Amino acid sequence: MKILRTKKAASATSAAWRRDGQSVALVPTMGYLHDGHLSLVRIAKKRADRVVVSVFVNPTQFGPNEDFERYPRDEKRDFALLRKAGVDAVFAPTPEEMYGREGATVSLSESALSTVMCGAQRPGHFAGVMQVCLKLFNIVRPDVAVFGEKDAQQLAVLRRMARDLDVPVKLVGAPLVREGDGLALSSRNTYLSPEERKRALALSSALATAENDWREGRCDDARRAVASIRRRIAKAADSVDYVVAVDKDTLEPVERLRPGVLIALAARFGKTRLIDNHILR
Ligand code: AMP
């Protein structure tokens, strides 16, 4: 597995593969890898001849009072996991390599898709996500990029960006991976105390209950479903940021539950903000 530290090396490596007629998949991550990230790698391997994983805690998507400094990092472990998973190259630049000494001056402005849900609580977050992903796409020029449905809003925002700006990459969504007891895998789970982790199970169980009630014909009223999820998680969480039922592509609120509806939520346990969601199929 190649370890690439510079944009030049990442571009050259990918360009050489493409010259040889090989397709390239990119999996962007912020590292501190878990099975959710590795499931994206498996999908990427099926979709392309070569897989590049980026490991970069992107400063521009963190707000001033967020956890950029304390975000968990373990490069050695990440690289060992990626090597074992059969990744061809890891791109792990420093912020200075990525943005230059002066930082970036051009940014992408947010739209209706990026100012709701997580975007309402984290102003500028999705502008930073779009910025870093567009840079990664331009550096690596992948045929395919794989993103988790764990971050369903991120996927919707990036699909829209790729469409609006004619970015020549195919975005592939990967199913959300959970622990055996239902907790959505996240690098931020490491912040949770055992007691907070136990309470956090309310998120996945409230989503599962809503899915069951819908599937068995007990509730297809979106407002009622959202209210019932909110009630359940409010009992367990220290605060609830949002619960919504929206179309998974437009993120517009829906009245009735149906396949393609994204039920998404964010809640806080102690200092940790967790997101979870379920897409009705
Ligand atoms: P992150 O390192 O948190 O920026 O995540 C990198 C990629 O992994 C994103 O596309 C995430 O959506 C995806 N991801 C994170 N957690 C999960 C999960 N539990 N299941 C599936 N994909 C995930």
Image (spheres, rainbow, N blue to C red):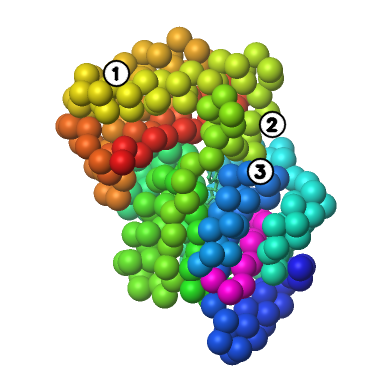
Q: Quadrant of residue 240?
A: top left
Task: State the separation of the CA atoms marked 3 and 1.
Answer: 32 Å
Residue 214 picture location, percent across and down: 26, 26
Overall secondary structure of the magenta section = strand
At x 41% / y 30%, what residue is drawn? 265
| Residue drawn 33% across the image and 27% down it | 211
Dot 2 corresponds to which residue? 190
**Residue 115 in the image, given as x and y percentages of width and height:** 36, 44
Which residue appears farthest toward the bottom when viewing the image? 19
**Label 2 crowd bin: few (<14), some (14–19), many (20+), radius 10 Å:** some
Ligand 1 within 8 Å of the CB at mark 3? yes
* Residue extending furthest toward the top: 235
**Residue identifier under label 3:** 34
Would the CB of label 1 be found within 8 Å of ligand 1?
Answer: no
The residue under label 3 is which amino acid type?
A: His
Would you call the spot at circle 1 few (<14 residues within 10 Å), some (14-19), or many (20 or more)?
few
Residue beneath disc 1: 227
- The amino acid type found where label 1 is placed reads Ala
Please report the bounds of the magenta region as a residue range.
48-57
Q: CA distance from mark 2 to mark 1?
A: 29 Å
Quadrant including the C terminus: top left
